[in-house]
Structures are given as C-alpha cells and as structure tokens.
Amino acid sequence: MFSDVPPGIAFLVKRLSHLLLPPVTVFAGLTVHRSLVAANAQSDSGWRIILLYMLSYPLALSFQVAYEAVVKRVLAARMNAVLLPEPPFMEDPTPGGLLFLYGIIKESQDGYIGGELMNRLRTTGPTFNMRIFFQDRVVTLEPSHIKAMLATQFDDFEKGETTLAVMQPLLGTGVFANDGDLWKFHRSITRPFFSRDRITHFDIFDRHANEAIRKMKTRFAEGYAADFQDVVSRFTLDSASEFLFGHDIGTLSDPLPYPFFHSSHSASDDPTSAFGQTFSARFSRSFNDAQTATSVRVRFGDMWPLREMWKDIPKEKMKIVHGFLDPIIQQGIQRSKLAEEKAAIEEEDETVLDHLIKHTKDPIILRDEIMNLAVAGRDTTASLLTFTVYMLSQHPAILHKLRSEILTVVGASRQPTYDDFRDMKYLRAVLNETLRLYPPVPFDMRQSNKHTTLPPIAPGGKPFFVPAWTRCIYSVFVMHRRTDLWGPDALTFDPDRFLDERVHKYLTPNPFIFLPFNAGPRICLGQQFAYNESSFFLVRLLQNFSNIELSEESSPPSARPPLSWKSQGGIKATEKIKLKTHLTMYVAEGLWLKMDEAPAVEDAL
C-alpha cells in the first residue's frame, strides 16, 4: 500500500490515529465540560484552550511512559525477574535519550568505535537498557546474554519487522534480514554452495589475487602507496561475482587511485573525477553509500522515516547496483529455461545463480539473495584482509613469523591448497586475532518476539526481564576487547593467544567470548569460505612482498586519527588509522601502504 509513498509520509499516515488522539481527547473533554457548566462559564480565554492542546502531547507521552514502567515491573515480578539497569539520570537527563543518541552519531563521525558503549559498561555493567525515543533498547556486551539471543533462546528473538524495514532497500527479503519460513527457505537454497567442494576451488581466487598484486606492484614501482582497502574490495567483489554469476564484474580492470597529494589524484568517491566515473568507482560508491545510509537508519530505530521524509535514501543509492544485477539475473533465468528445454546444466558449471533459479524464478527474490551474498562475499572478507594487513604493517615481527610459515609450508611461488591451510596454524591465529580486535561486523541486533528473560550474570541472581518487541543490540567489537574476558593484554595484538595456554584459560571454557561469525542457527554459512579466501590472498601477498609499511602521509588529513586519541591511552592511542563502520567496519579514506617486493629466489626464513 505504501511502497511508492515517501517513507516519512507513510510513517505519519500509519500513525495518524496516534497523532490525533491527544488533541481529540482534549476536544472531547472541552465539549463535555461546556455541556455540563453554565452558559456564562463557556467563555474560557483562547490562550488557555491553546495551552491545553499544546500540553496534550507531552501529557499523553508522560502517561504512556509511566504506564509502561508499571506494566514492566508487574510483568518482571510475575516472571521472577528484575529490570535491567539503566544509566544514571545525570548521565543523560535529556528526554528520549537524545544525548546518548547524539553521542553515538558524533562517535560515528570523529570518535572511536564502541567508545560510548565502553563508557556505559563502566557505570551500568555489560547489559543495560537505554530509552531512545522513549523506547526500550537493550544493549549487551555479555557473552551469556548474546549466547541466549543467538542460540539457547533462539526462538525468543528474531531480526524483527524494524530490521526488515531498515534493511529492505539494501537486502530486501534475503537471508540476513528475515525470519521464520522465509529465512529458512533462503538459508536452505544457499547452503549447498558452501560445501567443501565448492569453497576449495581456488582458481578464482588465484586469478584475481594475481591481478590485484600486479596492480599494486605497478603503483609501488611508480614510487607511490596503494590503497590496499580499495584493492582487496575489488578482489573480493570480482571473486564473489564470478562465484555467484560465473563471470566477474571486472573492477580490478579499472585504474587504482593515487594518494591525495598526487597531481593526478582523482578520488574514487568523487563522482566528478576521472576515477569516480569508472564502473568500479560508481558501483562501489553506490554500494557503500547504500550501506552507510542503512546504518544511519539503524541508529534512529523506528523513527528513521522522519529523517527520510520525502525520499528513500538507500533505495536511491542502490539504483546503480540494481541496474547491474537485473540484466544478469534475467540472463540467468533465460539460460535456465534453455537448459530445461535441452539438457540440465552440468553440475561443475553451475553457478550460485543457476542453483538459486532452480528454486525460484522470481527476479526480486533472486536479486535480494544475490545482494545478501554479495555483501557477505565482498565486505566482510575485505574488512578482514584490510585490518589483518594493517596489523602486519604495525608488527614487523609477526609479519616475519607469518612469512616464515608460508615459505616453509607453501614455498615462494606454489599455489596454496586447502591442506596447506590446515597445516598453517599461525596463519589461522593471525586471522583470528584480527577478527577479535577488528571484527568485520562490530554491531548486530535482535528483537524479542515475546516477554522473555536473559540469564543472571552473577551466580544465584535473578534473570533480567526483556519486554516483547524490544530491540536488543550487541557488540562483539567491545566484548572481544574486555580485559575481564580475555586477560590484561586484551588490547594487544598477539596471535599467539590462540595457540598458547591462554586458549584454555579464556576461550575454551567460554567459547561465546569470540563470535566474529555469529553463532547458533544463524551462524555464518560463509565462515570457511572467508577463511579460505583471506588465507589464499595473504599467502599470495606475502609470497610477493617481504615488508609492509603504512604510508600515513598518503591519507588525507581528515582521515587521520585525531591528536586527542594519543592522550586517551589504550589501543586508541596506538591507532594509525581512523575506524569507521556502516554494516561492516572499514578504514576511513582507505588503507594506504607501501610494500617491498620479495627476492626472486628465497628460502624459508
């Protein structure tokens, strides 16, 4: 009904009855009052009547908030539970939690990811309730509570209608944003393509990795740094598109951007520049802008349509992406019809799109599922590779140790195999430590679908009450950095923690402290695919380069960490890049690196 109506207008129309109820109540009250009093009392001054109408909204809101508070206490008592703690009033005395919301928005621009949540952790504990726009929002950094939402109480929590509405322009009805039978359907049709046989065909990775490395070598030979984040985003997108469609998008064929100070610099995010007009730049810009607009929606919750009163911003941003995908999907449907008329497509030649078309020929459902897989296939792995190589640039000893393992197990030029990766324990430890400190998806959420509870944190305590339809936000980014869960060196990048006694001390007894790929029935299907792709690219990269150096001067000044971080201690004081996040985490304005080529002949280090 409202699909073609601007989001803000549809929002107001749907809530028209709620908006009219307070003034209508005042009008009815005045009418009754006038009918009961003498005629000489009907000449109330106009300003008093206007004041009553103006006060009707805050009075109605106050009544609603007070009523909901009483109901929550009664329901919690019936379930022998307690209410979640809330931040002290003086920390945010603003109505509707506006100060906290402002802090989150400001943090997304110039702050450090998770800073606001860390501040709340110190005063409220790892799980607390925030009233944003007078609605409960449970925020948790507690492993047992995340475990409950994702696994042990899976049926009590879902993605929810709010998430579906927020994500719809980007992900549609795909597997990441839906619940129930539709989620089960999407998961069932994609699962077969993440079998070991499918995800160990490394020829796709090899072609695109070689091209990515060749492009970087050319740039380094010119004496300039390369934006590694841009390169691996193209590598993962081209690899994912070939995996999905049978042919790649070809973003690696476009020229790489130069550092901001170069005379020929043309930023790929500038649509008026030469670089910004390439297909790679336009596709990536559309994709990234849609994700950024979607992440802004998430912060505003149910109220996001008021920010997009006249235009669905993510939908507008996705036009270029859809313009590319729709013809491919139509071609796939036609190919499937021809195959049905002649002979079945050979299994080894079957793409993900071919497989999906066997289950549905609805182009919208197909596009939505492809988009979900594309987001997972490009952004999460690109994020993992970006932050892994960033850490290697800051820890030369770890880089040296990793190269030694690669040269010992694989050698200086051979293509790595699946069995090689099983033998490379340190490579997996480096990836896991990056996933711990820089998880690609730093924040996620669920919504309770009924009145439920979360388990007590302290032994013998009462469970915490969670009202029905409450949004529950959890941050693995902050949880992964808690010193009480990971030890006093939790903020130190040390891959050996996944190989030495610290595994048995911290991770083995409490596996839910490490959740880069989610957990429970909705655990990431592409987990092993991401490990294989990242491992493959790192092996090829370090076969070709012996040293990696961060080129801070190649980043524009606006993308460098604020000087204030230096005085704030912790890992923030050592960061050389500015962290940003939309649906996944990335480096502001790219990760600019210089690398030294490895010798032509090289033995194991």
Image (spheres, grey):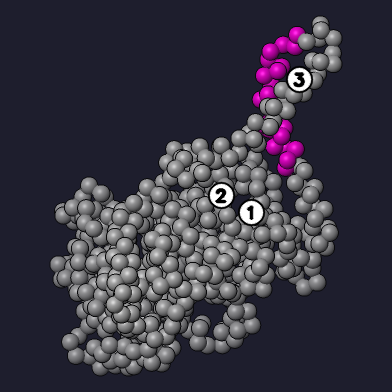
Quadrant position of the C terminus in the picture = bottom left
For the point 76% across and 20% down, the residue is: 30
List the residue tagged with mark 3.
Answer: 30
Q: Position of residue 341 (x, y in %)?
A: 31, 74
Residue situated in front as seen by the camera: 430 or 400: 430
Q: Main secondary structure of the magenta part?
A: helix
Locate residue 11, reporting x and y percent. 54, 41
* Residue 339: image tag: none
Tell me whether circle 1 and circle 2 mark residues in contact (CB < 8 Å): yes
Q: Percent position (x, y) of residue 546?
A: 26, 81
Asked which quadrant contains residue 324, the reply is bottom left
Q: Is residue 48 magenta?
A: yes
Residue 598 placement, left or right of 475? left
Q: Which residue is mark 1?
A: 137
User: Which tag, 3 or 1, sits closer to the chain's start?
Assistant: 3
Q: Earlier in the sequence, mark 3 or mark 2?
A: 3
Q: Nearer the viewer, residue 320 or 455?
A: 320
Element carrying mark 3: helix
Q: Residue 459, image x and y in percent? A: 77, 73
Q: Secondary structure at mark 1?
A: strand
On screen, residue 87 versus residue 536, left or right, reads right
Q: Which residues are magenta?
A: 43-65
Q: Residues within 10 Å of mark 3 (few under 14, many from 20)?
A: some
Mark 2 sits on what residue?
301
Q: Residue at x 56, y 53 (%)?
A: 162
Residue 544, quarter of picture: bottom left
Q: What kind of residue is marked 3? A: Leu
Separation (CA) of disc 3 from disc 1: 37 Å
State yes or no: residue 214 in magenta: no
**Label 2 Cα crowd, 10 Å radius (few <14 / some 14-19 / many 20+):** some
